[in-house]
Image (tube, rainbow, N blue to C red):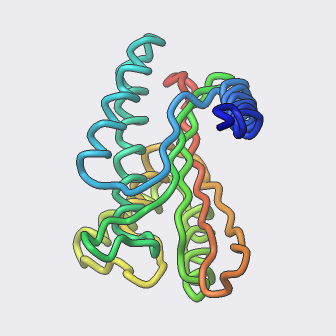
């Protein structure tokens, strides 16, 4: 019996993982999670990010902003992912957080139905075109009227992220192999770690 018959396959896999780890470290990504986003996972992830920010002595206002964006992004994925566990209704996706060159980056990726792309793209492009005052007005209107979109539009969470960061939301839709019904929706939110520059 050959105990080490599969060893070369294991070593190649480990080399791939280490290479990926090195690439993430070069890009400043310290927290990466892929899977289902339950309330417990959200709490664990946010507390890990908080410890990460404490280590780098972030300004309190920056920590609050990063924390707020993380929670909004996680809630957005939990509510709007079209890759949902049928047993518990919890959404699945990918979540990445890291800091590089003085900016925190929060990146999410989750499956959405291809038919939602046009509405979501239009909604985000609209948010990206608004001034800070316009975003504040839209936010208040959404709260007052409760007219949140369930069909791919930008809801309160995305409006609030755009308001809080003062930056454009970066996004992309990636087609999935052998799956015409769904795309991967990638969202990147950038937060300046120097509060005086915002």
Work out which quarter of the rendered image holds the C terminus and state it.
top right
Task: Locate residue 57, reporting x and y percent.
Answer: 43, 11
Q: Is residue 21 above or below residue 78?
A: above
Task: Locate residue 96, reporting x and y percent.
Answer: 54, 42
Q: Is residue 175 above or below residue 18?
A: below
Instruction: Give the residue drawn at x 64%, y 55%.
Output: 170
Number of numbered discs visible in the structure rendering: 0
Instruction: Give the residue drawn at x 68%, y 86%.
Output: 180
Work out which quarter of the rendered image holds the N terminus and state it.
top right
**110 or 155, which lies in front?**
110
Task: Locate residue 68, reporting x and y percent.
Answer: 35, 42
Image position of 54 (left or right of 120): left
Image position of 170 (left or right of 194): right
**103 or 130, which lies in front?**
103
Image position of 140 (left or right of 103): left
Please identify the quarter of the rendering in which residue 141 is found.
Answer: bottom left
Q: Is residue 47 above or below residue 43?
A: above
Please identify the quarter of the rendering in which residue 173 is found.
Answer: bottom right
Instruction: Give the residue drawn at x 38%, y 80%.
Output: 149
Q: Is residue 167 above or below residue 86?
A: above
Name of the residue lying farthest toward the front: 1
Task: Locate residue 179, reporting x and y percent.
Answer: 66, 82
């Amino acid at each position: 019996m050959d105990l080490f018959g599969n060893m070369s396959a294991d070593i190649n896999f480990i080399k791939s993982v280490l290479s990926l780890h090195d690439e993430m470290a070069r890009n400043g990504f310290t927290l990466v999670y892929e899977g289902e986003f339950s309330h417990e996972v959200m709490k664990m992830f946010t507390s890990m990010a908080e410890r990460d920010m404490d280590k780098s002595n972030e300004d309190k206002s920056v920590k609050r902003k990063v924390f707020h964006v993380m929670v909004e992004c996680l809630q957005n994925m939990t509510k709007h992912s079209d890759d949902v566990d049928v047993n518990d209704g919890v959404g699945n996706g990918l979540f990445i957080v890291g800091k590089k060159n003085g900016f925190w980056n929060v990146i999410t990726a989750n499956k959405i139905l291809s038919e939602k792309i046009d509405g979501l793209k239009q909604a985000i492009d609209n948010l990206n075109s608004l001034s800070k005052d316009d975003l504040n007005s839209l936010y208040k209107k959404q709260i007052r009227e409760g007219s949140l979109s369930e069909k791919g539009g930008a809801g309160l969470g995305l409006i609030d992220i755009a308001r809080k960061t003062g930056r454009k939301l970066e996004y992309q839709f990636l087609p999935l192999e052998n799956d015409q019904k769904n795309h991967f929706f990638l969202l990147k939110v950038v937060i300046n770690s120097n509060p005086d520059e915002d």
